[in-house]
Image (cartoon, rainbow, N blue to C red):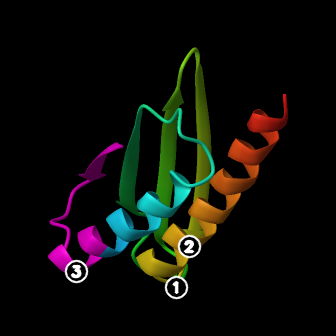
């Protein structure tokens, strides 16, 4: 699966990129029809503690799934968004 990572207004660390790719590879186990995915990393209001936002868009044949999480760290947000997407993929697979 091709995964594009977009960081909005900041440079993303290589360790975070590897972390995201590792989590995204696990999503392929649930649905072999995943064509591609996009991950958007954003920082919201700097003064707040939970200011890391991760949005995940997955492209399936004829369908697009989306999930978004906001947490204290990007790693925590990535874990949350991947779990939310896993549930959506399993639900879509049942149809």
Spot occupied by residue 59 in the image (x, y as percentages of width and height): 49, 30
Image height check: is 61 above or below 59?
above
User: Callout 1 environment at 10 Å: few (<14), some (14 to 19), or many (20+)?
Assistant: few
Foreground: disc 1 or disc 2 = 2
At 48% across and 73% down in the image, what residue appears? 51
Residue 93, percent from left and from top: 75, 36
Q: Which residue is labeled 3 in the image? A: 15
Start and end of the magenta stretch?
Answer: 1-18
Q: Which residue is mark 2?
A: 79
* Relative depth, front residue between 78 and 70: 78
- The image shows residue 87, relative to residue 21, as above or below, that is above
Q: Where residue 46 sits in the image (x, y, percent)?
A: 39, 75
Proximity of marks 2 and 3: CB atoms separated by less than 8 Å: no
Is disc 2 placed on a helix, strand or loop?
Answer: helix
Mark 2 crowd level (few <14, some 14–19, many ≥20, 10 Å Cα): some
- Residue for badge 1: 49
Q: On the rendered structure, is 87 left or right of 2? A: right
The earlier-in-sequence mark between 1 and 2 is 1
The verdict on residue 15 being magenta is yes
- 72 in the magenta segment: no
Task: Examine the rendered structure and indicate whether residue 7 appears above or below residue 11.
Answer: above
């Amino acid at each position: 699966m091709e995964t594009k990572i977009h960081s909005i207004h900041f440079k993303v660390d290589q360790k975070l990129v590897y972390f995201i790719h590792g989590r995204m590879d696990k999503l392929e186990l649930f649905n072999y029809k995943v064509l591609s995915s996009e991950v958007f990393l954003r920082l919201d209001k700097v003064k707040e503690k939970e200011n890391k936002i991760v949005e995940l868009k997955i492209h399936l044949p004829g369908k697009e799934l989306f999930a978004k999480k906001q947490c204290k760290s990007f790693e925590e947000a990535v874990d949350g968004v991947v779990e939310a997407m896993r549930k959506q993929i399993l639900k879509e697979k049942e149809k």
